[in-house]
Every structure is written in structure tokens, then in C-alpha cells.
Amino acid sequence: MARETIMIGSVTYAMKAKKLLDGIGVRARLIKKTVTSDRGCTYGLEYDSEYRLQVAMQLRQNGISFQHRSDTGL
């Protein structure tokens, strides 16, 4: 199964997003990427790509900003 990654930013919102996705049956893994910029660490979620639309819709409906990553090599 192909995996996708979305970057969220703060660990608080990433954890909230994971809880929301768990609630609709989408298993997601919390990830952390250290960025070499003034933003510091960035957090996100990795999940099966078949859930891309459900993930996007759920996060938008709950006001969580995110950015899809085309690669998962973090």
C-alpha cells in the first residue's frame, strides 16, 4: 500500500489531527521532521494514500491547516 504524508506544523495540531482521523477509522502515524530554518521542527502524519480525500476533508472541516508532501523520505 502506498503511503502519503501531510505536514501540519505544530505537534498539538498534528496530535489533534491524528485523533480526528482515528475517529473515522484512518490509521495515521505521527512523524517529526527537523527543518533547517527559523520554523524549527515540523510535525505531520503518514497514512495510506487511499484515504487522501477523507483526510483532507476531515482536516479542513476541523480547521487544521496542512500541506501534502509528494515524497515520504523524511
Image (cartoon, rainbow, N blue to C red):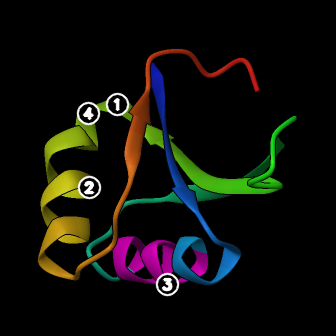
Instruction: State if disc 4 and disc 1 touch (CB < 8 Å).
Output: yes
What kind of residue is marked 1? Ser
Within-10-Å neighbours for mark 1: few <14, some 14–19, many 20+: few
Q: Secondary structure at mark 2?
A: helix
Residue highlighted by disc 4? 50
Residue 21 is covered by the magenta coloring: yes
Q: CA distance from mark 2 to mark 4?
A: 10 Å
Residue highlighted by disc 2? 55
Q: CA distance from mark 1 to mark 4?
A: 4 Å
Q: Secondary structure at mark 4?
A: helix
The span shown in magenta is: 15-22
Within-10-Å neighbours for mark 3: few <14, some 14–19, many 20+: some
Q: Could you tell me which quadrant the N terminus lies in?
A: top left
Could you say which quadrant of the image residue 57 lies in?
Answer: bottom left
Residue highlighted by disc 1? 49
Q: Please give the name of the residue rendered at 14% of the width and 44% of the height, measured from the top-left corner.
A: 53
Residue highlighted by disc 3? 16
Say whether disc 2 or disc 3 marks the residue closer to the N-terminus: 3
Could you say which quadrant of the image residue 40 lies in?
Answer: bottom right
Q: Secondary structure at mark 1?
A: helix
What kind of residue is marked 2? Val
In depth, the one of 44 and 52 nearer the eye is 44
Instruction: State if disc 1 and disc 2 touch (CB < 8 Å).
Output: no
Q: Please give the name of the residue rendered at 62% of the width and 84% of the height, measured from the top-left corner.
A: 12
